[in-house]
Structure formats: structure tokens, C-alpha cells
Image (cartoon, helix red, strand yellow):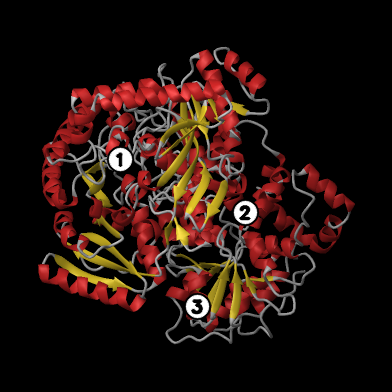
């Protein structure tokens, strides 16, 4: 337990007595993280608790009741309506209570703890040909407890409906700390031998039955009218004709009536065959007009989105990141399934013909490629993040992102809704579950000023009236939370609102469970996170963010894609530790707190922020994988620069940050220095420099090695490109420079070498930005000399530094001109090679480790694709960071995390290599190759640079070059 305050001392003491070992955190480094979810709201809690069992939850609720401290249950923290932030204790179920307790493939049920990630359940169920039907776009990081809290639905709700329809039983803890089970027959105590619990639970059930009997008419007429009517409490499940299903009635209560610790859920069979249609339209209203006809074909999904989302995705991840869409400015995805692929494809083609005859589409196609389908679904699933920060830099916010009407009324509602937006001078980015009548929209509200907040309140009030006029619901899946709770009186009668209040009071008479939502709601414009902030003076220019550093860290809106443990590359440290403060989102939230002077009040000197950034590998993957383009590597470099300004730095900042300079000096005496470093004195020097002794220090090349390597590569042809020989290549593997020169010549783009400049990367990654700027300025001055030839960089991290860090740190036209000329070797061979170029014979199979900086910065120019085009039949890519990440994995305190990251993807790929069959491993990054060498040990595996693989002069793939 850490940083307890006087106000919390009774709670902390009580928990120490009743739940020894329970993890309780009260410091700003934790409360700042949990002050936010994916909504517009900021409510700092007083403590964050990480329960490991239902008994821990009992202890917390009893202690909070004794001390009158409210409790908010939290899963993945992806709530968009402010459902999972609260002023007291936040219970984070995702950290430890995330076990799948049982799967019964015969009964088609699973019993899971509240913190289980949906994708984890789906993966486990898939082994039995089953899945969980509801699938929100946040499936890679949302928890079952959160889905139960909001009654989540997802992309395939046309087929599978809401979470409430898949719940068999809930294991709950009541506000006064009693464990109970809610199921289709009512409510019972978890322990039938606990007389007090049995009596307490029986009293609860009796009170609820009396409440329902007294409100039958309003419940029957006002609830359950449209498929996505999530707003309020779902009391209609307690009607006599529905069998008094207490489990379903508690779904969607947002943790305001009881805390769910586990659930038994129903599973559904996985379809044997499926296909996807993409349909183009001039307008989302035209798309909505076709929905009723599409629903007649029994689709699994009918999803819509407008052009802003697609444009942002292409800008973020490259023009080739979205393919397979027909012409249009709005699109529908329609998924059909069945038992036979041919029959499904035939239905899809028939539906396409019918829709063409309707005359609204601009085009349509059936997408047969599984890879293309995955790419298209990613665009839709990242909609919330992509819409948050658009191509032009404009920002949009939730608040009215979740209204739902009957599907047949969707087009009429959208027409009126867009008129309402126009009347208020607002712009909305539309996407959502069109087949279920549920529309998500992010709107360019001005939430930072009093005038803007007042205007937002007026719009939301009128929007609520509009959706009710169309017979719809304020919320279709995200819940009411703080965003819509106040507006429920627009939707429901006073009598039903009173019934909601009575229902909560039965379960939570003291109002301690998630206060401020649904019943006695907080004002919708209270506790808003956004406010006007002063500009922060920084060294980086942050050219893509209007408010500079403050605007850059504000990019994080909490969608939490960085908390996924699969797909893409971010966030390696979170995947290794599972801690929120090691996620991109957690770090961004603490930086936001630092800028606003919130829970973090000591600015750039903050130890909390420093500690949160400590395990950031600066891989830059978030700048590509994060839907809003958070670039934590840059934010970390800026923070380190400011934090250590005028102070002594960690030793590794000197030993590793100054490596380009020291390696030049070592080059004059490489052989004796290498011998020295291999002995006992080398370990002593490593310790003095803050470098781990668990790794072998790579051998330095002599100053003559590069000259020899380049001399053997000369062709006498006029140079069409410049080979920028970076510090790592020059110091440790000059043979790569020679191979790259020969490959470029062989590809018809011969080069001349530039071997005495530096990109400044090591000074950037250690936050020594003043030095980095001087080094970069010299490099730019030499390269921006009227020569417009492409610059090819063999080391991906240095290429990325020249491409992004140099222009963003210097902010000059010259820097931008140089950056525009930079290519990796992969990019050069993709874009510049002579037509018809054929490389030497390549192996059939390659194990590939793509450098994170290349993945993030050079979109659409990845070695995997190039190798495939050049004839390699199988590329087994270790998708994710290697774990070494420049200086990170060499630093003594980071070695264990470095190896844990390697265990996620790289080590398993290397372990799969058959020792009887020589394997070709390709890794262009020096860090990646060094990590592979470390992991391989004495197994004889050596990573080749792509240049060495393609080298026309190589006797065989993998022949090592001379290094000294």
C-alpha cells in the first residue's frame, strides 16, 4: 500500500485488517490514471484497489460502507459515457480477476471472472467451435464485467443482440458486502448456510417483487420498445411474463446496484462460412435507406461509417491500409454467414444485385480475401479513435455518440439529426451499427470554455428530444453514465424514473455504488476533463497539434487499444507487465494531469510521470497503431529533456546516449577495446555506465572496416541515391553498408556513401534534445545542399529519426526537405528499383523481425511485403517489438522487461526453428539483430540484414562479414 492520506487512513487500516495483502494505491501516479475512461469526464478517485477474489471485493465494500466512501467498478476503462470513473474507490477487475473459470461445450456456457477480456474468452471458446455473440469494437481490451455493466452489443448485434441476452447468472456482491447469485429465477445467497446472508438476500428479492408489482403498466409500456433500448434499468426482465430474471435486470445497471465479480454466460456456435459485402453510397442517409432490405437477408452485421474515418485511417497508416471499398462517401459493411461457403457467396451476390436495383449505391463488391476483410473490419473497429482526431487535426468528442432508433426509422432520424447539427453549427463524424438502428457520432463540441459547454448542453437536450420523438433510446449500448443520466427524464415518465430510483435504493440504500449515473445523476456538464490550458514551452515543435505539447498528449481519448495483447505492435511494455501505468493510455493520462496541474502538481519534475515513462521502449508503435496517433516516444524524449535539465542524468544516458561519438573514438583501437570489454574490466565498465552485464557488448568495428566494405561495393556507375551510413552500421556492422551498396547497384539505383553524419537518435531517445538539435542541424546542413537524390538508410531507427524526429525537432524547411528524401532499404527497393529487377535466388522461408520504427514510420513499405513480392513463399513474422529497443534493453534496470517483451513474439519464433534445418532470420534493425543473437545463444542462428540477404556478391545467405 502506498501514499495513504489522512482522509483515507481508516479505510486503508480496515482493509489491512480484513484483506491483508490486498493491493491498494492512493498516490497521484495511480489516481491520475484512473480519473479518466474513454469519455469526456475526469473524476479523480481517492484510491484504486486491485482485488484478486470475490472475498477481496466483500472486504472493500464493507470497509467503504463503514467509512462512507463510494465505490466504482471498472473493467477495461473504455466506457464512453463516464460510467467507470468515480470519486471514491475504483475497483480494477482487469488486473487480477481475469480468469476463465470453466467452459462447458455441451451446455454451451462459460463461467468467467468480471475482468476477463472478451477476446480471451472468444479464443478459449473457439477451441470448442464456440464464441460469445456480442462483440463490441473494443473486444481486444473490454472486459465481460464492463460489457455486463453497459449491456454492450457490438458489430454483430443484428444476429446476437445485447449482452443481457447471453447471461445465465451473475455472481454479485451487494453494497453491504453480501455475496449473492442472480439468475433467471431471482436472487439467492451465495452461501446457503450463512443465515444472515440468506435473510438479507430474501429481503432484497421481496422488495424488488413489490416494486415491480406496483409499476407493471409503466414498465410494460415504456421499456423494451426498440432492440437497442439500453437507457435506464431493464426492469421489464422482472415482469411475470419474463420469469423474474434478476440476472438480466442487473445487466446495464453500470455497477450502481451491485458489483459483479463473475458471470455464467451462454456461448453460440461459430459460423462455418461467412463473407463480407462492402457497399458504397454518396451519403449515410442513403445507406440507412437500404438497411430494411438488407435485414430481410438475415445478416450477422450491418455496419456503417462515413468518409472522414476512412480518410483518417489512410493518413495514419498509409494509403494502402484501406482497400476493398467501392467508390463513395459513406459505406456499409454487410456480413452474411452459413454452413456452406459457396451458398453464402451466392446469397451475397444475389443481395448485391437486389441493392443495385434499388439505385442508391455508388458501388458494391463481395470481399473474398480474409486478410482484406480483417483490414476492413479494423477500420470500422477503430472508428471511435479515428473520429477523435481527423486528418485536418480537428477534434471531436463523445457525449451523443450512442443513440438508437428502430432500424426502419434510421434514415428519417439521421436526416433530422443532421439538421440539428447544422442548426447548432456542429459537425459530426458518423459510424455505427446501422442494422440495429444504433448510431455512433463524435461531434466537434467546444468543451474547454464556459460558452462552449453551455452550447453543448443545449444541443444534447434537443438531441434527446429528437431521438425520443423518433421512438428511440438515448443509449444503444454505451450506457447512460454521466453523459446521459440527466437526460433520462426526457425519455421516461416521472413514474418510471421513480421506479429506477426505488430499484437502486433497494440494493444500495446509502448511494455508495457508482454515484452520479442513472439515478440522481450528476449534471452532464460537470466534471468535464477538457479546459483551456496555457501553451507549454517545448523543444519539439509538435507541428501536428495546434496546442503543442498539451494538444499532443490530449490526443489520448482513452479508447485503450494500447491495452490489447494481440494485433499490431503497441504497447510492448503493457503486454509484458499488464499494468495500466505501463500502457500508452496510462502514460498519456498522467502527462495530461501534469499539464493541467491536477493530481500531478510538480510539472516536468514529476517522479510519477518519470516512473510511468520508465518502461516505455520508445518503439513508436503507438504513433501508428493508436487510432489517434499518440506518439509516446516523442513525449518521453521531451519529458526527459525537461526533467533532467540542469541535473545529473542516469549513467546510461551518457554511456549509451553518446554512443555515436564514443564509437568513433573506439574505432581507432577497436581490437584492444573489444578484448578489454570481453574481460572482467568490461563488466566493471558496464556497471559504471548503467549497462547490464547480462548481455555481451557487441564488438566494435575498426575505422578501416567501413572503408573496406564500401570499397568492395564500388561499381563506377553514376550514383542515383545517397547511402546514409548511420552510426550503428558504421560502428558495429560495416558489412551491411557494403551489402546495401551492392544491392542498390544491382537494383539499378547505385549510390554514393555519406558516412560521417549522425541522425541524433541516441540523444533523442535519452532526452538530450539540445545536443540532438545541434547534431541534426549539422546533418541537415550537409544533406540539404541542392542535391535532391533519395537518401537510403540501412538502419530503420536512424531512417525514422531523419524522417520524423529531425523535422519535428528542428522545424525548418531544410529539415523537411531532407526528411522527404529519406527511404529505408525496403522503401528504396519498393519505390525506386529498376523495372524488372530480379534479386539473387532467395530462400523459400524467412523468419522476419521488423523494426518497430520502420513499422510505425514507413507505412506501406514493410519488409514482409517486399520479401513476398521478391518470391519468398513464407514469411514468418514476429509481430511485435524485439524488446531491446536501442538503449532500453542494454540498461541494467530494464533487462528483465526487455526479455519479457522478447518472450511475447520473437523468442517463440526463434524457438520454432528446427535446429536440423538452417533458418534464414532477417532483422534490419541493429537492436533486433543483437537481441536475436542474445536469444539464440549457441544455436548458430544469426540475423541477416535485408541487404545481406539480397547481396548479389554473397556466397550464400547469412555469410558473415569481417567486422574488425
Q: Nearer the viewer, residue 823 or 636?
A: 636
Disc 3 and disc 2: Cα gap in Å?
26 Å
Q: Which residue is mark 1?
A: 242
Question: Helix or strand or loop: what does disc 3 sit on?
Answer: helix
Q: Which residue is mark 3?
A: 868
The reply to whether callout 3 and callout 2 are in contact (CB within 8 Å) is no
Q: Which residue is mark 2?
A: 885
- Give the quarter of the figure containing the N terminus: top right
**946 to 310, vertically: above or below:** below
Q: Is residue 527 visible?
A: no
Q: Badge 1: few (under 14), some or many (20 or more) residues near its Cα, within 10 Å?
A: few
Q: Badge 2: few (under 14), some or many (20 or more) residues near its Cα, within 10 Å?
A: many
Percent x, y for residue 535? Answer: 39, 31
- The circle drawn on residue 907 is none
Question: Helix or strand or loop: what does disc 2 sit on?
Answer: loop
Disc 2 and disc 1: Cα gap in Å?
57 Å
- Give the quarter of the figure containing the C terminus: bottom right
Q: Residue at x 80, y 44 (%)?
A: 687
Q: Nearer the viewer, mark 3 or mark 2?
A: 3
Mark 3 or mark 2, earlier in chain: 3
The reply to whether callout 2 and callout 1 are in contact (CB within 8 Å) is no
Percent x, y for residue 522? Answer: 32, 22
**444 to 201, vertically: above or below:** below
Q: Nearer the viewer, residue 815 or 17?
A: 17
Q: Residue at x 22, y 44 (%)?
A: 404
Q: Quadrant of residue 859?
A: bottom left
Amino acid at each position: 500500500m502506498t501514499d495513504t492520506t489522512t482522509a483515507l487512513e481508516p479505510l486503508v487500516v480496515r482493509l489491512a485488517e480484513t484483506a491483508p495483502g490486498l493491493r491498494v494505491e492512493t498516490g497521484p501516479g495511480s489516481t491520475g490514471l484512473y480519473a479518466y475512461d474513454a469519455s469526456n469526464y475526469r473524476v479523480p478517485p481517492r484510491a484504486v484497489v486491485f482485488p484478486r477474489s470475490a472475498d477481496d471485493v466483500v472486504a472493500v465494500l464493507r470497509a467503504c460502507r463503514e467509512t462512507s466512501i463510494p465505490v466504482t467498478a471498472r473493467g477495461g476503462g473504455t466506457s464512453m459515457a463516464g460510467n467507470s470513473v468515480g470519486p471514491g474507490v475504483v475497483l480494477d477487475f482487469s488486473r487480477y480477476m481475469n480468469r476463465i473459470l470453466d467452459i462447458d461445450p455441451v451446455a454451451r456456457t462459460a463461467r468467467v471472472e468480471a475482468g476477463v477480456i472478451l477476446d480471451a474468452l472468444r479464443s478459449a471458446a473457439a477451441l470448442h467451435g464456440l464464441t460469445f455473440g456480442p462483440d463490441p469494437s473494443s473486444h481486444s481490451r473490454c472486459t465481460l464485467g464492463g460489457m455486463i455493466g453497459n449491456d454492450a452489443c457490438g458489430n454483430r448485434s443484428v444476429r446476437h443482440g445485447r449482452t443481457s441476452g447471453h447471461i445465465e447468472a451473475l455472481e454479485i456482491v451487494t453494497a453491504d458486502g453480501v455475496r449473492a447469485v442472480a439468475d433467471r429465477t431471482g436472487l439467492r445467497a451465495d452461501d446457503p448456510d450463512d443465515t444472515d446472508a440468506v435473510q438479507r438476500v430474501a429481503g432484497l428479492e421481496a422488495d424488488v417483487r413489490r416494486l415491480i408489482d406496483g409499476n407493471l403498466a409503466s414498465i410494460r409500456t415504456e421499456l423494451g420498445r426498440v432492440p437497442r433500448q439500453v437507457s435506464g434499468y431493464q426492469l421489464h426482465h422482472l415482469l411475470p411474463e419474463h420469469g423474474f430474471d434478476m440476472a438480466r435486470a442487473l445487466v446495464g445497471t453500470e455497477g450502481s446496484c451491485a458489483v459483479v465479480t463473475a458471470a455464467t454466460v451462454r456461448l453460440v456456435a461459430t459460423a462455418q462460412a461467412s463473407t463480407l459485402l462492402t457497399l458504397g453510397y454518396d451519403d449515410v442517409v442513403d445507406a440507412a435507406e437500404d438497411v430494411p432490405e438488407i435485414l430481410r437477408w438475415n445478416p450477422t452485421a450491418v455496419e456503417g461509417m462515413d468518409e472522414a474515418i476512412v480518410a483518417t485511417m489512410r493518413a495514419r497508416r498509409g494509403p494502402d491500409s484501406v482497400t476493398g471499398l467501392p467508390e463513395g462517401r459513406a459505406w456499409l459493411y454487410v456480413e452474411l454467414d452459413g454452413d456452406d461457403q459457396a451458398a453464402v457467396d451466392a446469397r451475397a451476390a444475389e443481395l448485391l444485385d437486389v441493392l443495385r436495383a434499388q439505385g442508391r449505391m455508388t458501388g458494391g463488391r463481395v470481399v473474398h480475401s480474409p486478410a482484406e476483410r480483417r483490414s476492413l473490419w479494423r477500420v470500422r473497429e477503430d472508428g471511435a479513435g479515428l473520429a477523435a482526431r481527423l486528418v485536418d487535426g480537428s477534434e471531436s468528442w463523445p457525449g451523443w455518440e450512442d443513440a438508437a432508433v428502430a432500424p426502419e426509422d434510421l434514415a428519417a432520424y439521421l436526416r433530422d439529426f443532421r439538421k440539428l447539427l447544422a442548426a447548432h453549427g456542429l459537425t459530426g463524424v458518423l459510424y455505427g451499427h446501422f442494422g440495429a438502428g444504433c448510431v455512433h457520432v463524435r461531434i466537434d463540441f467546444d468543451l474547454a470554455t464556459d460558452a462552449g459547454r453551455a452550447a453543448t448542453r443545449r444541443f444534447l437536450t434537443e438531441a434527446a428530444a429528437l431521438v425520443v420523438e423518433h421512438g428511440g433510446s438515448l443509449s444503444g449500448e454505451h450506457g447512460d453514465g454521466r453523459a446521459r443520466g440527466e437526460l433520462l427524464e426526457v425519455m421516461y415518465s416521472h413514474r418510471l424514473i421513480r421506479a429506477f430510483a426505488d430499484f437502486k435504493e433497494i440494493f444500495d440504500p446509502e448511494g455508495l455504488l457508482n454515484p452520479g449515473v442513472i439515478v440522481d445523476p450528476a449534471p452532464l456538464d460537470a466534471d468535464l476533463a477538457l479546459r483551456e490550458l496555457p501553451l507549454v514551452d517545448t523543444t519539439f515543435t509538435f507541428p501536428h497539434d495546434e496546442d503543442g505539447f498539451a494538444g499532443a498528449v490530449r490526443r489520448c481519448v482513452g479508447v485503450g487499444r494500447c491495452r490489447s495483447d494481440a494485433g499490431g505492435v503497441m504497447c510492448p511494455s503493457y503486454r509484458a507487465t499488464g499494468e495500466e501505468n505501463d500502457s500508452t493510455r496510462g502514460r498519456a493520462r498522467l502527462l495530461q494531469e501534469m499539464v493541467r496541474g491536477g493530481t500531478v502538481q510538480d510539472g516536468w519534475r514529476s517522479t510519477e510521470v518519470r516512473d510511468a515513462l520508465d518502461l516505455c521502449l520508445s518503439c513508436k508503435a503507438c504513433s501508428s497503431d493508436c487510432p489517434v496517433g499518440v506518439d509516446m516516444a516523442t513525449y518521453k524524449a521531451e519529458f526527459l529533456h525537461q526533467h533532467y535539465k540542469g541535473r545529473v542524468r542516469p549513467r546510461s544516458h551518457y554511456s549509451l546516449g553518446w554512443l555515436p561519438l564514443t564509437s568513433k573514438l573506439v574505432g581507432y583501437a577497436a581490437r584492444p577495446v573489444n578484448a578489454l570489454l570481453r574481460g572482467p574490466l568490461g563488466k566493471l565498465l558496464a556497471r559504471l555506465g548503467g549497462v547490464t552485464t547480462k548481455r555481451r557488448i557487441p564488438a566494435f568495428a575498426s575505422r578501416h572496416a567501413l572503408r573496406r566494405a564500401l570499397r568492395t561495393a564500388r561499381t563506377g556507375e553514376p550514383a542515383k541515391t545517397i547511402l546514409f551510413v548511420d552510426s550503428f552500421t558504421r560502428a558495429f556492422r560495416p558489412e551491411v553498408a557494403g551489402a546495401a551498396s551492392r544491392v542498390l547497384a544491382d537494383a539499378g539505383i547505385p549510390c554514393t556513401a555519406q558516412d560521417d553524419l549522425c541522425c541524433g537518435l541516441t540523444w533523442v531517445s535519452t532526452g538530450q534534445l539540445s545536443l540532438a538539435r545541434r547534431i541534426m542541424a549539422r546533418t541537415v546542413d550537409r544533406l540539404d545542399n541542392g542535391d535532391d537524390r533519395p537518401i537510403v538508410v540501412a538502419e530503420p531507427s536512424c531512417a525514422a529519426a531523419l524522417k520524423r524526429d529531425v523535422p519535428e525537432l528542428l522545424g525548418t524547411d531544410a529539415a523537411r526537405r531532407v526528411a522527404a528524401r529519406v527511404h529505408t532499404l525496403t522503401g528504396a527497393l519498393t519505390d525506386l528499383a529498376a523495372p524488372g529487377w530480379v534479386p539473387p535466388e532467395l530462400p523459400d522461408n524467412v523468419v522476419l523481425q521488423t523494426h518497430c520504427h520502420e513499422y510505425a514510420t514507413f507505412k506501406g513499405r514493410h519488409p514482409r511485403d517486399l520479401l513476398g513480392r521478391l518470391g519468398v513463399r513464407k514469411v514468418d513474422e514476429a509481430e511485435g517489438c524485439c524488446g531491446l529497443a536501442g538503449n532500453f534493453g542494454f540498461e541494467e534496470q530494464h533487462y528483465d522487461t526487455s526479455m519479457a517483451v522478447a518472450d511475447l513474439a520473437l523468442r517463440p519464433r526463434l524457438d520454432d526453428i528446427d535446429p536440423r534445418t538452417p533458418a534464414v532470420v532477417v532483422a534490419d534493425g541493429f537492436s533486433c539483430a543483437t537481441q536475436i543473437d542474445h536469444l539464440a545463444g549457441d544455436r548458430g542462428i544469426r540475423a541477416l540484414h535485408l541487404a545481406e540477404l539480397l547481396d548479389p556478391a554473397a556466397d550464400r545467405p547469412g555469410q558473415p562479414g569481417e567486422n574488425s
